[in-house]
Every structure is written in C-alpha cells, then in structure tokens.
Image: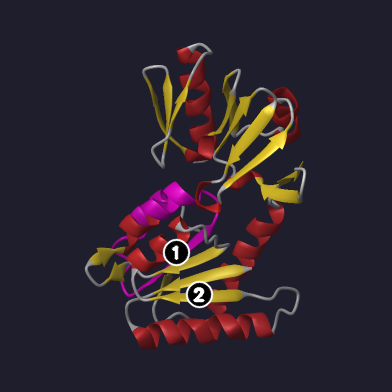
Amino acid sequence: MTIALCDDELPELEYLRRLVVSYYNGNKQFSPTISCYQSGDDLLLSMEKGQRFDVIFLDVFLGASNGVAIARKIRELDKRCSIIFATNSREHAIEGYAVRALQYLVKPVSPLALSEALDQALENSMAKPPRFVHIKTRQNMFSVLLSDIVFAESDARVITLYRGDQGKINFYEKLDNFEMQCNDKRFLRCHKSFLVNMEHVRLIANNTIIIKSGEEIPISINITRAKELFASYMASML
C-alpha cells in the first residue's frame, strides 16, 4: 500500500503519520509506504512524475491552496485512489464528496476514525485489483499496468506503447491482438493505428482525441460514436 499524507502543519502531519503507522502495526497483512507533503503542489508534482498512491489524506486548508481544488487535480491524474479528507471544518464536506472522497474526518482525527477509513480503503483496493498486460520485446519482458498506458500506436506491425513519464516501449504485435489482450472498457479503438486509454483523455473535438498531456490522436471511426463511448466511460467513473 502506498499512502500520501498532505497537511501544511508539520505537527498535524506527524500526528497523522503516527496514526497510520500504528494502524499498520496492528494489521500485518500489508506493509505501507508513507509519503508526507506539506503542500498540495508538491503532492501533485510527485504524481505528475508517475508516483501512484492507493490512499491520499488531504487537509482542506493547505496554506494558500484549497484541498478540494487539489483533490480535483488528483482525480485528473488518478480516478481510483482513495481520497480521505482530514480537516478542522465540516464546511466543505459536500465539495469533498463531489470529488468522490472516501471519507471526511474531522480533526483531531481519532485512531478509531482513521482505522475505519483505512479499512474501507483496503476493501476498495482489494475489490479492484490492478490489471497488467505482459509485453515481450527482443531484449526484455514487461508487465505494464493498464492504467499506465496512455495510448498505443501501430506502424507496420510495430506497436509503440506510450506510458507518459515512464517512457515508451516498442514491440512487434498486431494492434488487433494487443487490443484483445487489454480487453478493458477504458480503451477506445479510435483509428486502425491507435488504441487510446480514455483515463488519459481530456476531450474529443474536430475528429481528434486530445490527451491530457497535449498529444492529439486522429479519429477515423464515427465521431458521434467516439463521443458516446467517451461519455459513457466517464459516467461509469462517477
């Protein structure tokens, strides 16, 4: 389990860290990796560089930043992590649930409240185990998380797999076969040469898919159908 704690007050951050450590000392099934951040921007920068978290604890008031706004940006990077708010005020509770927060804990966070929140986060994590595809190149074998795939491009039976900050992988395979291997509703075959992970799509416009990182992917299927599939996928994530 990878856990991020984000609070601009160092004593609060350390208190929360101790609670999490104590929880896992009594739950030997999992061994956590805990990362602490005193600003939402630092947390986002880490995620933009490829760091993934199973659970993120966020304060609503992060100095000059708003924790709910940070949570919205987190959701653009990761739709599946469990976000748990820990704050002094209930004022933003409705906004917190709007970004699909798992729970909303009021400070001082009690050990029981934290345990219940982490129990729920663990249940969510185990209910949806991460899926991988296995790729063989001339030199290596790779196990790639489906969520890490941004899109795949095929040219003369050579597939280039784009994984954002994690770089590209080139391997020999028909795109039809690779699409069947992925076999997941998040993937859209928008073109004979492109397979796109809709998790990473910002919008569809003018026969083009625009990826959150800025790349533009051509669409050769019916544009209305492409928009319907994207809308249906996004609705399923709410």
Across the whole image, how many numbered discs are drawn on residues? 2
Mark 2 or mark 1: which comes first in sequence? 2
Outermost front residue:
138
Kindly tell me whether residue 103 is visible in this rendering.
no
In the image, is residue 68 above or below residue 134?
below
Q: Residue at x 76, y 50 (%)?
A: 140
Q: Residues within 10 Å of mark 1 (few under 14, many from 20)?
A: few
Q: Where, by quadrant of the figure, is residue 162 drawn? A: top right
In the image, is residue 181 above or below residue 123?
above
Q: Is residue 47 left or right of residue 33?
A: left
SS for callout 2: strand
Q: Which numbered dot is residue 35?
A: 2
Kindly tell me whether residue 75 is visible in this rendering.
yes
* Residue 145 on image: x %, y %: 66, 49
Asked whether the residues under the numbered discs 2 and 1 touch, taking CB atoms below 8 Å apart as contact, a structural biologist would say: yes
* Residue 120 on image: x %, y %: 61, 63
Q: Amino acid at mark 2?
A: Ser
Which residues make up the magenta segment?
72-99
| Residue designated by label 1 | 46
Residue 97 forms part of the magenta stretch: yes
Q: Residue at x 75, y 34 (%)?
A: 181
Q: Residue 106 versus residue 69: which sits nearer the camera?
A: 69
Query: For the residues marked 2 and 1, what is the alpha-carbon distance in whole angstroms?
Result: 10 Å
Q: Amino acid at mark 1?
A: Ser
* Residue 199 on image: x %, y %: 52, 40
